[in-house]
Amino acid sequence: MDNIYLGIRVVFPLLTFMAVGISLRELKWFSEKTFLELNKVIFRVFMPILLFLNANMDSARDVFSRQNIQVLFIAITCILITLVMTSLLYRRMEADKKRRAVLLQAAFRSNFLLYGVTVHMTIYGEGNSSAVAILVIAIVPFYNIISAILLRSATVSKMSVGSAFKTAFTNPFVIAVISGLLFNLSGVTLPELVYAPLNQLGRAGVPLAFIVLGGGFGIRRLREEWKVLLHSSLIRLILVPALALTIAYVFGISGPPLTALIVLCAAPVAVASYTMAKEEQVAPELAGDLVAITTFLSLLTVSSWVTLMGFWNLL
């Protein structure tokens, strides 16, 4: 019961933000143009600030233990395996290049920064978070680089290596994470006078992103796309965490590091994937539906993973 409450505690606020977005659209208080302009601000201001502050962590120098490196290795392995397998799958199932890019992004990119970290902190408190730190430091930029290349490649007939690097490293999300890491390594600390307003701006990005997501959400599309959404949810919420748990078991990993890995792999599709898809105009409706449906289903799946891990004495 506690694990079910944990899922509700994390997901309910996100669903509430989406409901606000749906209401603003239905009441015609926000137009499509307003949602589009708000998404640009989220993409270029709020979310980059959030990513910068999360990359600029005090613990960044202290997280490279052997077990944490193993966790990072397993996470990257799972992402690459997922990318390869889903690329082969969707090449046969989906002819549209833009839709295929969004489905690939949904398969490998989880909402770890906003969702997974919250789940981990709810279970363990603010301690025992070094594995979380190394995953945020390494995986978040990895997510953003791959997503930037995937989405841009869907809009051009051919992408060179140079163009791929330019696309990745001019993306506001990637710039923000790298800047945060460099700032952290410099040893300079943001004064509270500067940090406090930046933190407030960064935190505003989360509810705003889900409000915009709600503004583009359509029940009719769910009925039309239910097969695609169902198998994408199965991959994101069941198969990827199962793969991670299997590899971690072989390495003998348990406790907080394992939980960090599983919530990374079991978290729903990242809301940033919708923000980026909408900015690039790469099947944004499908991207939004994938975020919405996996966020809702994660109420059941994430609590189930936590319950199983507790039953197997792995927490």
Image: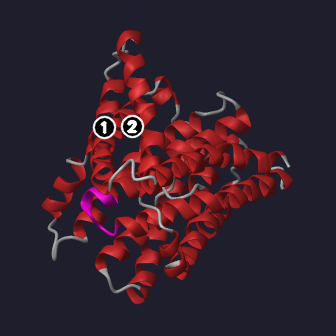
Q: Is residue 55 left or right of residue 72?
A: left
Question: Please, what is the three-letter code of the amino acid marked with disc 2?
Answer: Leu
Residue 206 covered by magenta stretch: no
Residue 307 in sight from this viewpoint: yes
- Disc sitting over residue 130 in the figure: none
Is 168 above or below relative to 289? above
Residue at the bottom extreme, as displayed: 92
In the rendered image, residue 4, in percent from the top left (x then y), is placed at 78, 51
Distance in Å between CA atoms under marks 1 and 2: 6 Å
Residue named by callout 1: 176
Residue named by callout 2: 51
Q: Are marks 1 and 2 in contact (CB under 8 Å)?
A: yes
Q: Secondary structure at mark 1?
A: helix
Question: Please, what is the three-letter code of the amino acid marked with disc 1?
Answer: Ala
Which residues, given as a range, are shown in magenta? 277-283
Residue at x-position 36% and y-position 49%:
30
Residue 282 covered by magenta stretch: yes
User: Who comes first in sequence, dot 1 or dot 2?
Assistant: 2
Residue 314 in sight from this viewpoint: no
Q: Is residue 176 left or right of residue 166?
A: right
In the rendered image, residue 275, in percent from the top left (x then y), is placed at 36, 53
Residue at x-position 55% and y-position 56%:
74
In the rendered image, residue 173, in percent from the top left (x then y), is placed at 31, 44
Residue at x-position 35% and y-position 71%:
101
Residue nearest the viewer, comparing 92 with 287: 287
In the rendered image, residue 103, in percent from the top left (x then y), is placed at 43, 71
Residue nearest the viewer, comparing 288 with 66: 288
Is 295 above or below relative to 64? below
Q: Secondary structure at mark 2?
A: helix
